Amino acid sequence: MGVKLLLEKANVPGIRTYDVYRREGGYATAEKALKEMSIEAIVEEVKKSGLRGRGGAGFPAGMKWSFIAKPEGVPRHLVCNADESEPGTFKDRYLMEFLPHLLIEGLLISSYALGSNDTYIYIRGEYAWVADILEEAIVEATKNGWLGKNILGNGFDCMVHVHRGAGAYICGEETALIESLEGKRGNPRIKPPFPAIQGLWMRPTVVNNVETLAAVVPIIKMGGEEYAKIGVGRSTGTKLISACGNINKPGVYEIDMTISVEDFIYSDEYCGGIAGGKKLKACIPGGSSVPILPANLLLKTAKGETRYMNYESLSDGGFATGSMMGSGGFIVLDEDQCIVKNTLTLARFYRHESCGQCSPCREGTGWMEKILQKIELGKGESSDIDLLWDIQRKIEGNTICPLGDAAAWPVAAAIRHFRDEFEWHINNRELSQTSNFGLQHYADPIHVPA
Amino acid sequence: MSLQFNNEQMSEFKRLVARYPEGKQKSALLPVLHLAQDSFGGWLPTEAMDYVASLLEIEPIEVYEVATFYSMYNLKPVGKFVFEVCQTGPCMVSGSDNIIAYIQKQLDIKPGETTKDGMFTLKLVECLGACGYAPMMQVGKIYREHLTKEKVDAIIAEYRMQVVAQN
Ligand SMILES: Cc1cc2nc3c(=O)[nH]c(=O)nc-3n(C[C@H](O)[C@H](O)[C@H](O)COP(=O)(O)O)c2cc1C
Ligand code: SF4
Ligand code: FES
């Protein structure tokens, strides 16, 4: 069993309620922070921990916190990003659903460190019942003096508010989220100014992911240095991975980032192997935006070294032969899955979610979907692959927000690693409607079929 | 104006608006539109949007542009129960296509349509954050996960029973 810092208590009956959470040692860390630590000391521990943002970009949390502007007389805000809409990702939901008080304790410590008296949780609208769980937990925490005025007699006031979104992936992007929280369409803002200077209501704002803010609790509890000892290199602490697709045990797992990809997929403690005794074909290891990898490059790097479940190892080889940790949404595809069709569903997703502000993203995502649809329906032409490549290249790097890149990368990686599967579809128009390219030569190099 | 929040809905409205600073009441727009949709039959006629604008003291256009941006707001009437089935990659590789086809057959409607009796609407949606419990759909506030054909039949029967019991 690996180290568990976040989900250690997830299976304790009733842990969702204040009483059980408190009995299990909950809020003791918040008490320590508010009673014994200075604001600077808290920020320093978070810096020392090496904690990287768990929302996808992996930006060091302590550094982000130290950027927040502190102009006299202007309120500051912490916003918790619970929009969780990247396909393959459902870890924040799990944390909020089963351990709402862990998040609130993390929010309290973080709000104190940042000087946020009104902290918002922006939760995707579809998680309606999770919003109810959070609201209930906030009521309990307030009743017990952990939220409200003059908390623990320390003079600090803090209220946490739940704000439900209404169905828009783009609102996970921090400036779109801020716009949405202001009651507008989720159109990302041009940066600078960065939220740390002018964010919510033009006030200094820090936006952090649910898991990032929950991780503040173990960091303050054990100290940044101890936290940093877990993991490897710049991948410190533990990471939640939501595993899905064709595996025996889909679900949310907390890993310490020294486990190999192979162990994560095949060990019974985690994914439990490929469902139905089938063979592994490919995997999107960090949410739908990150490059898909064929089994051979997933389990071993291009240099033939074991690949591990951490930031550095997953991106080893760059986009040519590697991928990314991203949001921790781990999507496994077995031998029967069609890469063209899978890429099509993702292209449709990004077309649907583009806010439409930039023409390369708005037009490009539509074109990519149309061309992929054509190939999938057995009407593709050989020039289509190059056309797809050209379109994705013209989107990447040419847009206001990273959604454009996020839409381009899955298409680019699918063509890069599975070009012959696209060609097969185009050359076998009829056959491709009734059968499937299958595994061909993308075999798992370790679990060689008998 | 005939559409109005009742007392209970009005106090919920006030609770929502109180979360934001003085003068920033427009921030409550998304939550208030959810409340309006839930209060006025599952969708947002223009009249409801105008009402929300007047309550928040903003221009109607500020409400329309938001209501049209977010996928959870229905701008047309929907059935009593809306089946929102996820069709994105992870659900697709876990068999959502078969479930979607089965629901279409059982309800005899296509995506975007409502059954003649006004009971069910079928909507195809993108990833709902339940990829590990696929195939899945959202019905109202809840997620129905690990769908199979048998489960779909049971769910349809369950909602039909609910309506019979209410009448
Ligand atoms: C299109 C898009 C969608 C995003 N969705 C999310 C999301 O659902 N949750 C999240 O925490 N971060 C999301 N992000 C990243 C946020 O912009 C931001 O970097 C993050 O919330 C910062 O928190 P962290 O540093 O704790 O990770 C998204 C970014 C983009 C470009
Ligand atoms: S890249 Fe796409 S989603 Fe992002 S601002 Fe431009 S159009 Fe909107
Ligand atoms: S892909 Fe269907 S819930 Fe995520």
Image: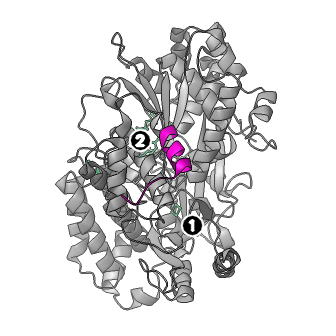
* Residue depicted at 61% across the width and 9% down the height: A154
Q: Tell me if residue B84 comes above or below residue A243 in the rendering.
A: below
Element carrying mark 1: strand
Q: Which residues are magenta?
A: B1-15
Q: Quadrant of the N terminus of chain B?
A: bottom left
User: Please, what is the three-letter code of the amino acid marked with disc 2?
Assistant: Ala
Residue A95 locus on image (x, y percent): 63, 43
Side of B76 where A40 appears, left or right: right
Residue at the front extreme, as displayed: B1
Q: Quadrant of the C terminus of chain B?
A: bottom right
* Residue depicted at 40% across the width and 90% down the height: A431
Q: Tell me if residue A429 comes above or below residue B121 in the rendering.
A: below
Circle 1 chain: B
User: Please, what is the three-letter code of the amino acid marked with disc 1?
Assistant: Val
Instruction: State the residue position of label 1.
Output: B139
* Neighbourhood count class around disc 2 (C-alpha, 10 Å): few under 14, some 14–19, many 20 upward: many
Query: Depth check: B36 or A236 in front?
Result: B36
| Res. B28 mark | 2
Q: Is residue A229 magenta?
A: no
Does the image show residue A64?
A: yes
* Residue depicted at 37% across the width and 45% down the height: B55
Circle 2 chain: B
Q: Both on one chain, marks 2 and 1?
A: yes
- Pointer 2 residue Cβ closer than 8 Å to ligand 1: no
Does the image show residue A86?
A: no
